[in-house]
Image (tube, rainbow, N blue to C red):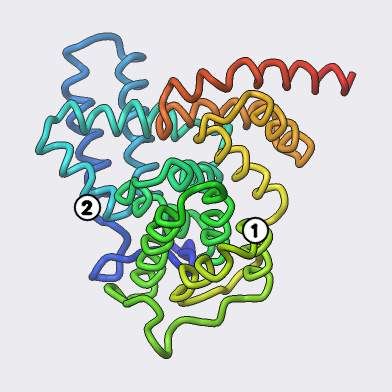
C-alpha cells in the first residue's frame, strides 16, 4: 500500500498497528536473494521474469493475507523451501497475480469455492481475511457464504459462519469474541433474513438465522446482482455440477456483464482452489457457451 493511501475499514492490522511489515521485508529479501542467485543461472531477461514473478507473488500474498500470509510462508518454509517457492511463485505469482481478474474479485470467488467445497477452515479463514482486506464488507462476505452454501449440509454452513464471525471480530479488534455476545452483534437486516428464507426454505430458516447471529456489523451495501452471478457460478463449478448447470451459470454471468476473458480467468483460478479435475469438467460447457454467446452477438 502506498504512503498516504487510506486503508479499508476492515483491514486486519498487526499488534503495532501496521499491516504485516514482515511480508514487506520478505519482498525485499526475496528480490535480493533471487537476483543474486539468478546471475549464476541464465540470461538477464529470464532473471528479470523470475524476479518479477516472485515479487508479484509476495505482493499478492501480502495484499490478501497480511500477517496470515506471513505465517503461511513460514510454515511452508519449515516443511520445505520448495513448498514455499511453489506457493509464492506459481500460485500467487503466476496465477493469482494475473490482471484479467482483480484480487478483489478473486477473493470473492475463492470464498465461494471454499464454502461450496466445505470443511476447509484454515483456507476459508485466510480468504475471509482476504475479502475484508481487498475491500469487501462483512455484509457482503456473509451474503457470499449464504449463496455458496446452498445445497450444503447445515453443519458445513454453520462452520463457515463461525470462521466469518471470528474474522470480523478480529478485524474490529475483538479477537476471541463469542457467538451472540450481548451488546456487540447487530440485528440481522431484513433483506438478509429474506435472502436466507428464499435460499434455504422454511424448514432450515431458523437454523440459518441462528448461524448468522453474532456478526458484529452489517454496514455497507448488499452484494450486487453482477457479483451474485459470479458467486453462483463459482459454487456450481466447485460442486462439479452437471454441464448444463455450468453452462447456464456461465451464460448468466455473461449477461450480467462479466467478460469471456474474466470467466476464463476464473477457470484458471479454479485449478488452485478446487483442482484440475473439477476445472476440466467445465471446459466443454464453457467452450460451447462462449461460442454460442459470441455467435448471438454477431
- Residue at the top extreme, as displayed: 42
Query: At x 44% / y 76%, what residue is drawn?
Result: 214
Residue 104 appears anywhere in the view:
no
Question: Where is residue 62 drawn, in percent x and y?
Answer: 34, 48
Neighbours of disc 2 within 10 Å: few (<14), some (14-19), many (20+): some
Instruction: Name above or below for residue 250 compared with residue 128.
Output: above
Q: Residue 86: which quarter of the image? A: top left
- Which structural element holds mark 1? loop
Badge 1, how many Cα within 10 Å: few under 14, some, many 20+? some
Q: Nearer the viewer, residue 109 or 2?
A: 109
The location of residue 59, given as percent across then percent down, is 36, 42
Residue at image x 29%, y 9%? 43
On screen, residue 209 above or below 67: below
Q: 204 or 138, which is in the foreground?
A: 204
Question: Where is 99 relative to 138, above or below?
Answer: above
Report the front residue among 19 and 49: 19
Q: Which residue is mark 1?
A: 223
Q: Image quarter for residue 29?
A: top left
Q: Which mark is residue 22?
A: 2
Mark 1 → mark 2, Cα distance in angstroms: 33 Å
Taking the spot 21% from the left edge, 33% from the top edge, the residue there is 84
Mark toward the start of the polypeptide (1 vs 2): 2
Residue 19 point in image, percent of width and height: 32, 60
**Residue 37 placement, left or right of 20:** left
> Outermost residue toward the front?
203
Q: Residue at x 49, y 69 (%)?
A: 212
Residue 242 badge: none
Of tags 1 and 2, the one toward the viewer is 1
In the displayed structure, does residue 209 sit left or right of residue 222?
left
The N terminus, quarter of image = bottom left
Task: Determine the secondary structure under disc 2.
Answer: helix
Amino acid at each position: 500500500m502506498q504512503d498516504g493511501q487510506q486503508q479499508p475499514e476492515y483491514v486486519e492490522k498487526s499488534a503495532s498497528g501496521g499491516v504485516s511489515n514482515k511480508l514487506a521485508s520478505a519482498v525485499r529479501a526475496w528480490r535480493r536473494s533471487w537476483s543474486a542467485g539468478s546471475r549464476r543461472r541464465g540470461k538477464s531477461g529470464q532473471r528479470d521474469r523470475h524476479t518479477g514473478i516472485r515479487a508479484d507473488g509476495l505482493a499478492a500474498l501480502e495484499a490478501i493475507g497480511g500477517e496470515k500470509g506471513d505465517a503461511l510462508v513460514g510454515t511452508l518454509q519449515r516443511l520445505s523451501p520448495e513448498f514455499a517457492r511453489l506457493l509464492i511463485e506459481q500460485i500467487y505469482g503466476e496465477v493469482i497475480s494475473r490482471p484479467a481478474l482483480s484480487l478483489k474479485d478473486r477473493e470473492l470467488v475463492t470464498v465461494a469455492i471454499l464454502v461450496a467445497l466445505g470443511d476447509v477452515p484454515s483456507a476459508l479463514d485466510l480468504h475471509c481475511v482476504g475479502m475484508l482486506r481487498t475491500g469487501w464488507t462483512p455484509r457482503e462476505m456473509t451474503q457470499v457464504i449464504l449463496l455458496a452454501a446452498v445445497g450444503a449440509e447445515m453443519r458445513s454452513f454453520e462452520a463457515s459462519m463461525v470462521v466469518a464471525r471470528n474474522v470480523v471480530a478480529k478485524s474490529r479488534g475483538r479477537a476471541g469474541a463469542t457467538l451472540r455476545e450481548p451488546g456487540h452483534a447487530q440485528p440481522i437486516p431484513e433483506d438478509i433474513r429474506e435472502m436466507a428464507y428464499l435460499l434455504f426454505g422454511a424448514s432450515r430458516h431458523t437454523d440459518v438465522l441462528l448461524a448468522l447471529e453474532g456478526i458484529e456489523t452489517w454496514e455497507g451495501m448488499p452484494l450486487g446482482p453482477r457479483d451474485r452471478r459470479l458467486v453462483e457460478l463459482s459454487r456450481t463449478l466447485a460442486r462439479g455440477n452437471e454441464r448444463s448447470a455450468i453452462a447456464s451459470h456461465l451464460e448468466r454471468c455473461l449477461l450480467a456483464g462479466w467478460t469471456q476473458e474474466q470467466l476464463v480467468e476464473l477457470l484458471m483460478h479454479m485449478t488452485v482452489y478446487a483442482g484440475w479435475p473439477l476445472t476440466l469438467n467445465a471446459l466443454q460447457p464453457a467452450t460451447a457457451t462462449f461460442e454460442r454467446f459470441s455467435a448471438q452477438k454477431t
